[in-house]
Structures are given as structure tokens and as C-alpha cells.
Amino acid sequence: MALDFLAGCVGGAAGVLVGHPFDTVKVRLQVQNIEKPLYRGTFHCFQSIIKQESAFGLYKGIGSPMMGLTFINALVFGVQGNTLRALGKDTPLNQFLAGSAAGAIQCIICCPMELAKTRMQLQGTGEYKLKMKNYKNSLDCLIKIYRKEGLRGINRGMVSTLIRETPSFGFYFLTYDCMTRYLGCEAEDSYVIPKLLFSGGMSGIVSWLSTYPVDVIKSRLQADGVGGVTQYNGILDCVRKSYHEEGWRVFTRGLTSTLLRAFPVNAATFATVTVFLMYMRSEDDLRECEPGPVIQQPSSL
């Protein structure tokens, strides 16, 4: 279990490095002002950030997911594994229930982490060199939010995060289980790694599609108040105002960059975990097909 946990952390770090630029673009598109939009779409957003803020602008806020990675993986691995064992049988339904339990528990860390990430990603939008930094880094961001708003401020967007993560993680583990069974994943198969990569990538896409509209609302709630202006009184108010002002398409804003991110992030995660375990485990331990439960947010997915 310790080896699986360490492999998951290494794989998760690789996934964050690959996927964070896409996440920055997603957040920028989700929260931009519809009356004065800065970006016309996913690729224009990429180009604008690189041109105006340099390539490092795509990695704003990466410290927060990196800091929370170890704790999130520890919770996910522990809860998912123990829940599955408690349920008795390794069935698709139990995979979904165990994944949902893991998704719900890890929100304790995921929500503050994503709050800091979102605030950092929006800091200095359109500036090559920041004229004024509100936050030095992700930890400084959380400290300042806590001092100003207390625990409630740190957990802004917790309910929407819980609504998003619980079914999303369930679909992630369910899809991964079904894909590996369907593809006939066997340890002696020379194509086992490509099969695992494909399964992980598709699992990420399915998990994001299952709850993406909720993610839009979560991003808007966590970004609300930046610049001193508060627009929303809660989840339902955010849904109502967003739909009234921008129509149903608002709930798919940033979806392209999210899906572009989902597959390679999970592919990088599974590839890293698989290679790590191949070097660290003995041949007898490699009889199992799956490298251990691996997760990326939606979060992390």
C-alpha cells in the first residue's frame, strides 16, 4: 500500500505538470466577463496568456495542487480501498460507491486547494509583469483569505465541490474498472501499458463530462469577490444569474480545454505510476494488472 501510495503521488505530480496550463485556460474562460470578454475561445486564451504573461502565466497557481497532492492521494487511496473491501465484492456498483466515498472525503483538502489555485490563476490577468501582487504564493493566498474571511472564506465553494467530486470520482473508478475489464488487461500482455493509458484517459473524460456544469458554478463562486465585487449569494443564485445573463452555454464554458487536459493528464499519471511500479516491484508482485488506484481533480481528475 505504501508503494502504491508513493507511485500515485509521483504519477499525480506528473499529471499536474502536464495538465495545469489547460486548467488555467479553463478557469479564465469560466469566470471572464461576458460583456467584456478577454478571450474568444480555448486557443485564443492560450495564445493571449503566453503573449501577455509569458509561458509561466499558464502555470500560475500550480503550487496549490502540488501542495495538496500528497494528502489528497492519501485520502483517496485509503478511503477507496477500505470502502471497496468493506463492501465485500469488486463489482462495478461497488467501484462507483467506493470512488464516490473517496471523492466526498477528499473535498476537505480539495476545496481550499482549488480556491487558492483559482485566485492565483486570476491574479494579474493580461499582465506580462505583475504591477501588484495580492498573493505571493498559494500558501500566502490561503493565509490572507483566512485572516480576512475566516474558515468560511477558506471553504468557499465547499458544497459545490462536494456535489461535483462525489459522483465524479464514482464515475472515474467505474469507467476505469469497466475499461480495463473490456480491454482484457493482463500483466503478460505486451500492450498492457497502452491499454492502461487509454483506460485512464477515458476515465478522466467521462468523470469531467458527468459533472462539468457544477465545476463552472464552483469556479465562479470561488472567484467571486476578487476585486472587491461580490455577485452571488450562493449556488442557486449563481446558477440563476449565470443562466439569465449568458444562457445554457455558460455551463459548458471552458469544456474544450478541460477535455483536452483530461486525457493527457490521466495518461501521464498512469504512465508514470506504471513505470515506477515496474522498477520498484519484483516480478512476482507484477502479476496484478492494475498499478493501484490512481486519481487526478477532476480536480484533479
Image: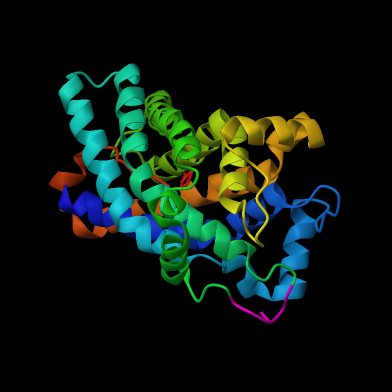
In this rendering, is residue 228 above or below 286? below
Residue drawn at x 49%, y 60% is 116
Q: Residue furthest right?
A: 35
Q: Is residue 171 left or right of residue 135?
A: left
Residue 270 appears in the picture as rendered: no
Rendering quarter of residue 143: bottom left
Query: In front: 50, or 193?
Result: 50
Residue 296 appears in the picture as rendered: yes
Which color mode does the image show? rainbow
Residue drawn at x 29%, y 54% is 71
Residue drawn at x 56%, y 42% is 218
Q: Is residue 80 left or right of residue 206?
A: left
| Residue 277 spot, x, y in % from top left | 26, 54
Q: Is residue 115 magenta?
A: no
| Residue 293 spot, x, y in % from top left | 30, 41
Rendering quarter of residue 228: bottom right
Query: In front: 212, or 184?
Result: 212
Magenta segment's dominant SS is: loop
What range of the chain is rendered magenta?
Answer: 127-133
In this rendering, is residue 60 above or below 269? below
Q: Is residue 132 magenta?
A: yes
